[in-house]
Amino acid sequence: MTKNQRIAYIALLAAQAVIISLVERAIPFPFLVAPGAKLGLANIITCMAMYTLSAKDTIKVIVIRLILATLLGGTISTFMYSASGAVLSFFGMWMVKKLGPNRVSMIGVSTTGAILHNVGQLLVASLIAQTWTVLLYLPVLSFVGILAGIATGIMANFLLTHVEKLEYYMYLQQSGNAG
């Protein structure tokens, strides 16, 4: 992939993630059991980036999404929660993905990201509230995160295996030529 193709692909993924984030933000809370929980649909794009780009380029997609989504409809607090969740989620997903496809599928990688995103957000909430009791909400959010992670992992896996151009990028990444 040429440098210009890579830049255009990063921009395309980031734009898709921003749009998904904004649409998801407009959806009322889908989980009555867990107020504040979201589906994490932008994680589909993160998974696609992780499987088709280098780690450095995946971080670029995430950072662009965080900044643009905040500028287009967020606040400093939403940025803090999103950024902490995204950072912890990315590193967890990256480490689990390193175990290899024979040990962990994309669904497992996505689920790891969903749970760690919740952990990151609750850590920020506990710092803001100045109490660790906020973390008592983690089991509820983890259950929702597991369900959402499975769903987004299935969707990302479907996209990567059924969109012809993405298979090409995935091949480039696996052969070591992407990055």
Image (cartoon, rainbow, N blue to C red):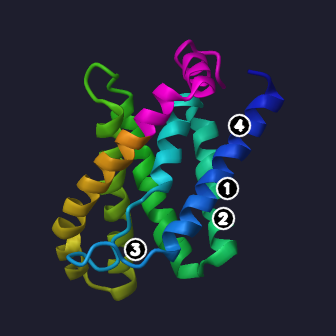
* Earlier residue among tags 3 and 2: 2
Position of residue 65 relative to residue 90, above or below, is below
Task: State if disc 1 and disc 2 touch (CB < 8 Å).
Answer: yes
* Earlier residue among tags 1 and 4: 4
Q: Which residue is mark 1?
A: 64
Marks 4/3: CA–CA distance:
32 Å
Numbered-mark total: 4
Q: Amino acid at mark 3?
A: Val
Going 63% across and 77% down the picture, which residue do you hit?
Answer: 73
Q: Which residue is mark 3?
A: 124
Residue 106: say if magenta.
no
Pinpoint residue 62: horizontal percent, then vertical percent.
58, 52
Mark 1 burial class by Cα count in 10 Å: few <14, some 14-19, many 20+ = some
Answer with the quarter of the image where residue 105 lies.
Answer: top left
Q: Which residues are magenta?
A: 156-179
Secondary structure at numbered mark 2: helix
Position of residue 20 relative to residue 155, above or below, is below
Residue 167: say if magenta.
yes
| Left or right of 179 on screen, residue 101 | left
Q: Which residue is mark 4?
A: 9
Q: Which mark is residue 178?
A: none
Mark 2 burial class by Cα count in 10 Å: few <14, some 14-19, many 20+ = some
Q: Nearer the viewer, residue 154 or 173?
A: 154
Pinpoint residue 113: horizontal percent, then vertical percent.
36, 49
Q: Amino acid at mark 2?
A: Ile
Marks 4/2: CA–CA distance:
18 Å
Mark nearer the viewer, 1 or 4: 4
Secondary structure at numbered mark 3: helix
Q: Which residue is mark 2?
A: 67
Pinpoint residue 5: horizontal percent, then vertical percent.
78, 30
Going 26% across and 84% down the picture, which residue do you hit?
Answer: 131
* Earlier residue among tags 1 and 3: 1
